[in-house]
Image (spheres, rainbow, N blue to C red):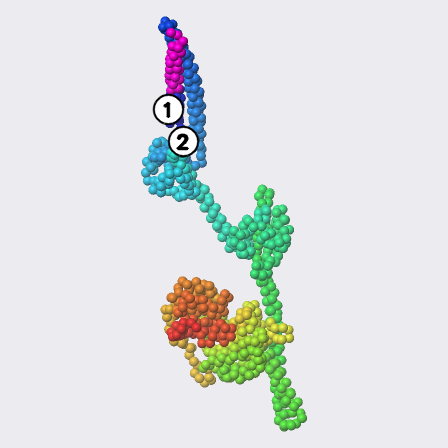
Amino acid sequence: MPVYDQERAGGHPGRPLIQNQTVRIVVIYAIFGLAWIYGSDHIIDLLIDDKGMLLQIAVAKGFVFILCTATLLYILINRLLGQLAAADRGRLENLENLSQKNAQLRLFFESAPASLAMFDRDMRYMEVSRRWLSMYGLGERDIIGLSHYEVFPEIPEYWKECHRRGLAGETLREEAEEFRRADGSLQYVRWEIRPWYQAAGEVGGIVIFTEDITERKRFETALEANERFLRLLTDHLPGLVGYWNGDLTCGFANRPYRDWFGKNNDEIIGSTMRALLGEELFLQNEPHVRAVLAGEPQHFQRTLVKRDGETAYVWSHYIPDLVEGSVHGFYVLVSDVTELKRAETERQRLEHQLQQAQKMESVGRLAGGIAHDFNNLLTVIMGLAQLGMRELGAGHPTLVRLEGIQHAAEKSAALTSQLLGFARKQTIAPRALNLNGAVEEMLKMLKRLVGEDIDLAWNPGRDLWKVCMDPSQLDQILANLCVNARDAITDIGKITIETGNVSFDAEYCNAHFDFVPGEYVLLAVSDDGCGMDRETMAQIFEPFFSTKEIGRGTGLGLATVYGIVKQNNGFINTYSELGEGTTFKIYLPRHTEEGARPLPEAAPAPCHGGSETILLVEDEASILNVAVSLLTLQGYQVLPAAKPGDALELAQQHRDRIDLVITDVVMPDMNGRELVRRLLPFCPKVKCLYMSGYTANVIAHHGVLDQGVNFISKPFTMNDLAAKVRAVLDAKGEAVD
C-alpha cells in the first residue's frame, strides 16, 4: 500500500478541527446567551417591580454577561488552541514518519533484487527503481507521471491484458518467460503483477516486479544438461550405480539398479536399504555398510538371487562420500560378472570337452580300426557258420549251435556298424533308395520298438525323390530317433514320421548356417513329448551326452545319427521347446540315376506375387526378418509383429485392410490358433496360414491345428512361401476355420 502526503491528499490536517471547534463555540455561546437573557429577565421580573432598580440590574447584568462570555470564550479558545497545538505536533510527527516511510520505500525500490515500478489506474508511473530503468534501457529518463504505454508504445496486447487483470484485483506471476530486448538479445525474466489498494479499499493501481534470471536460467539449463548426461551415462552403464544417504535411504539409482529390484524411480528413491534388500541380504551387507560409513571403501564379491530366481555373481564397491572429512553417504557400484563367471566355467568346460574330444577322436580311430578288423573276423565266422550249416544239413545236432554262432555274429555286426557310424568310417554299400518304401518296411519293427501306448503315424510324401545311401544307415537313424522320441513321452503320446521334397536356394542358405543350396529329400521324426531347452539342444549330438538315467542310454544314438547324415553329405535341424515336443528334420541330397545327364540347377517354380496386406506374426527375430523380406519382394504389404500382443494392436489399427494372417503356431504368450480367434472380431474375413518347425500331425495331436488347414513347414524357400501364400489368397471359401 503506498504512503501519501496528507496535504496533497486533502489540505491542512487542523482545518477540520478548527471548523468543528468553531461550531461548538457558536453553539455554546448561543445557548449561554439565550439562557442568560431569557432566564435572568424572567427571574428579575418575578422578584422586582421597581423600574429604576430594573434598569440598574439590566446594566449590571450586561457587564456580568460580558464577563461570563469573555471567560467562556477564553476557556473554549484556549482549549481550541491546545488542540491545534497537539494537532500540529501530530502533523509534524506524521510528516516525519511519512518522510521516513518514503525514504524506506525508496530504499526498498532501489535495493530490491528485482526491478520495481508502481502505476496508478491509468498505468502512469508513480514510482520506479533504477534497476527498472537499467533493465529496460531507459537510462536516466524521468518517466514519473508518464503512461507505461507511452514509454513502450509497441507493448503487446498480452501484457495489456495482464495489466487489466491486475487492475481488476488479480495477482499474476510467471517464473520464467522469454523476453526479447530491443537489441535483439534473448532474456529470461521472472515477473509478478500485484494490485495496490487505496484507503477506501479500492484498487489504486498495480505494482510490477521483474527479475532478470537469464544467468540463472543458463546455469539451470547447463545443470539440467549435465544431469541428463550423467543420468543417460549411468543408465546405460552395464552395472548398478546408486547413492545411499547417511541414514541409509536411497538418494539415486540408475536404470539397471531399478530394473534389478523391479521398481520405478519414485518407488526406490527414499526407500530404506533394509526394506529394499530384505532382512537377510541387509544383514549380509551391514558390516560393509558400517565400514563405509566410517570412511573405509569396501570391495567384495558375492552371489545374489535375481527376481526370476537366477543366481548372479556380482562385484560390489562401496565408496564413501567424504565432505570436509565427514561421511554424508556412500556410492554403490555393482558389476554383474555372471557372464564372466559363466565364460570362465564355459572355458573350463570347453577345455574339458577338447580333452574329451581328443580322447574320443583317439577312441574313434581305435574303434574304427578294431571294428574294421573285427568285421573281417565276423565275415569269416559267419561264412564258416553258413558253410557248416550247409554241409551238416537239416536235423543235425550241431546245426543249432551254428545258428547261434551266426545270430551272435549278426548282433556283433550291428554293434560294429554303430561304432563305425560314430567314427564316420562305416563301410557302406550305398544304392538308390526310395525312403517311402524303406520306412514302410520298418514300420512293424518300429511299432514294436515304441510300444502300444504310443501312436506311430506315417505321412509319406508324394512323388518322392530318391536318395543314395545304405539302407542299414536308414534303419539306424529311424531306430535311434524313435527310441529317443519314445523316452521323451510320458504315458501315451504320438510319434510322426514324414517325408517330402525340399529345395533350398542361395538366398535361404545365406541366412541359415550349414545349409547348402540344392534339392533334398526330407525325413522328419516328431514327437509330442517333454521337449528340450536350449542348453540341452546345444549338446545333443555330442558323443556320450545323455539326459537319460544311468544304464538307459549310451549317449551314442544321436551322435551316430549325426555322423551318418554328415557321411551322406546331408544336414540335420532340430526344433524343440520345453513342453512342446521335438522335431528332427534330416535333409539328404537328391540322387540322380547313373548314366543320366546331370540335371541343371533347378529354376524357381513359377509363381507370382500380389499387392495384398499380410499380417506376419513370428517370435523368432531372424525368421521374421527373412519372411518379411521374402514377402516384400513379392510385392505384398507386410505388417510384422514380434508377439501376439503387437499383432492384436495392428489388427485393431488396420482391420479390413488385412487380407491374410501368417502366424507361427507355438509362441510364448499364446498359440497361433488362439491368436486367430482373437483377431476375428477385427478382421472377420481374413484368411490364415499357419507355419511351424513342428509337423502338422503333432500340432494336430496337441489340438492347435486340424487337418486341412493352410500350413507351411519350416524351413521354406522363397518359392515355397510365395506359392503357398498365393494359393491361400486365391482359394475360395471361408476365410478361417
Q: Quickly name the residue at label 2.
A: 199
Q: Is residue 680 visible?
A: yes
Residue 47 shown in magenta: yes
Give the CA separation, mark 1 to mark 2.
Answer: 17 Å
Residue 230 has which mark? none
> Which residues fall within the magenta stretch?
23-49
Q: Quadrant of the N terminus?
A: top left
Mark 1 vs mark 2: which is more N-terminal?
1
Q: Which residue shows up at 57% across the image and 56% down it?
A: 335
Q: Looking at the picture, which amino acid does disc 1 mark?
A: Gly
Residue 76 shown in magenta: no
Label 2: element kind: loop
Residue 270 point in image, percent of width and height: 55, 49
Q: Which residue shows up at 57% across the image and 57% down it?
A: 336
Residue 309 point in image, percent of width and height: 58, 61
Q: Looking at the picture, which amino acid does disc 2 mark?
A: Ala
